[in-house]
Amino acid sequence: MDVIELLRVAWSSIRVHKMRSFLTILGIMIGVACVITMMTVTAGAQHDIDRQMREMGSNLMMVYAGSWRSRGGVRGAAGANAVLTEDDSDAIKREIPEIVAAAPTVRGYAQVVVGNRNWNSSVYGIDEDFLVVRNWGVNEGRLFEPSELSRGSRVALIGSTTATELFGEGQVLGQTIRVQNVQFTVVGLLASKGMAPGSTSFDQDSVVLIPLKTARTRLLGRQGVAGNSVEGIYISVENEEDMLYVEEEIKKLLHTRHRIDPEREAFSVNNMSEWIESRLEQQNTFNSLLSVIAAVSLIVGGIGIMNIMLVSVTERTREIGLRMAVGARNTDIMQQFLVEAIALCTAGGILGILLAIIVSAGSSYLAGWPIYFQWWVLMMAVVFSGVIGIFFGFYPARSAANKDPIEALRTE
Amino acid sequence: MNDIISCENLSKTYVLGDEEVHALDDVSITLARGDYAAVMGPSGSGKSTFMNIVGCLDTPDTGNLWIEGEEVSQMSRNELAGVRNKKIGFVFQQFNLLGRTSALDNVALPLLYAGVKRHERRERAYAALERVGLKDRVGHHPTQLSGGQQQRVAIARALVNEPAILLADEPTGALDTHTGEEIMDIFDDLNQSGLTIVLVTHEYLIAAHAHQMIRFLDGKITGVEQLKAEAA
């Protein structure tokens, strides 16, 4: 039969009972809204993670001495069993061809002073690979010269937060800052990176970078960091697929170099999977709540559709009889009521999408979660609502189609 | 091959509680093309069952029925729907028009199930409404029409797919005498132009428009009277 005609009949029947139709599709609407909100928030989180991963550095790994899980204080771990050195870093870079760059790093936390202003910052001692690994660069000024790195010059690159706190809007380049009473000349202002992944308090821009050698001789040496030991090695891997393999290779290499039994986990390699898990965990709670609401709403909504379709069939028994008398076959009647159920559910699905947009935007605003709408999810929602219409509309439609035309025409 | 309705030993039995009701008991009758028959009888006489079976809304338990030479008594529900759609036009006492639907769309309804294209449906529905004198009411809804006008819309709907037979069940039962007469004039004209009409009524004045009268009692035909000479 004529599809346009079927839709027209369905629409006129829905239009006659506006309020009833709306209440009927409320369940479908809420169910669909829950599913879409869930997908949207999850996709938003995934996007956020991807973005932060990219900003952290491409295919980044961090190697530390000691076990990652037990690593409380940094130096505590380094002193536990084995100590990483710059030679380890060089060896990793030399022996494992899948690695693009390896940056030995020391890190501390210090008060940085300019005139009468001061600010607590992370202080990293770095070499030329660090900014490569972290996919980082300067907005103003320049990077360290090789000679500055090898001599241990008192030069610094500072993060945007530290710069703002110390200099306000004023000139940064060429200024002098004091870190633990050692004076440094600022040669570059780092590009802004924002909060660290998985954290809302660890500001990656509250940072001062100085040459590794300078850090060791002028600052950390006083805290007992000796020789050419480093706290951690940042590593960038060429291809993402090689990450797991490279992780194993690094451990193997380090255990051999330090002559430590490979069974003992003397070194840990962290590729950030942990914070991704914790990041997704918050959403999982939210998602399982929404899943339950969605499932209940869709089932109850579907039953509501079935109920109202049965009412509609009963109300229009005489019309069904008449249509049969003038030549409608069972399938024609069946189609008519199925289309009506599908139209109702699809309308519910579309309203559900609108509701989802509001709810997602709201939860994004309140919980600070990023959202990401995917077209295929919206399309699927509409198709899925239609399927619910078919499923729950089938029984009423069949009961309409099976009516006896004589009985139906006799109905008052 | 001039027989348009041919019934042979039609029987239909209903079970009501413990009782068997012989709604139709061995009924045989033949109507020719262009006949104009009035079916009369008290309620429960079997005339409604007869009309339902002839109208292909119901099937007999035993016996045979031919419509235009085609055996229909053993047909499936869907095949019967096709026969109703193409060969039979119904007119009911209560008009049975779809509410909130224009006269034109009401009339076009049988064509929808005949698979006729939308444009042609509208043209033919318009022509049918013109034939019953309602061409200026095509856009009106049933509630905006008088009883007589509604029944004329129903007649247009019965005619729109050019049926072989027009079956009318108390077509004037819900109308006043004057309006009823107007409706009967339309039937007379339709019969004049060759359409076979069978109508159920319990009013003699209405039955008098027909050319023959078939009397039912207790599921049997008790008599067929010629009322007046047939036109041809």
Image (spheres, grey):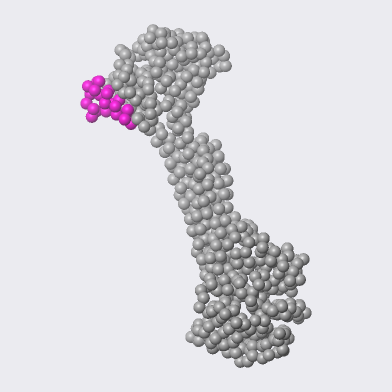
x then y, percent, for residue A186: 48, 11
The stretch in magenta equals A244-265
x then y, percent, for residue B141: 71, 65
Would you place residue B214 above or below residue B164 in this image? Answer: below
Would you place residue A23 above or below residue B12 in this image? Answer: above
Principal secondary structure, stretch drawn in magenta: helix
**Residue A125 seen in render:** no
> Residue A381: within the magenta?
no
**Residue B111 seen in render:** yes
Quadrant assignment, res B115: bottom right
Q: Nearer the viewer, residue B185 or A223?
A: B185
Q: Nearer the viewer, residue B69 or A135?
A: B69
Horizontal side of residue A17 vs A359, given as left or right: right
Residue found 69% across the figure and 66% down from its top: B125
Q: Nearer the viewer, residue B76 or A360?
A: B76
Quadrant assignment, res B91: bottom right
> Residue A245: within the magenta?
yes
x then y, percent, for residue A271: 37, 29
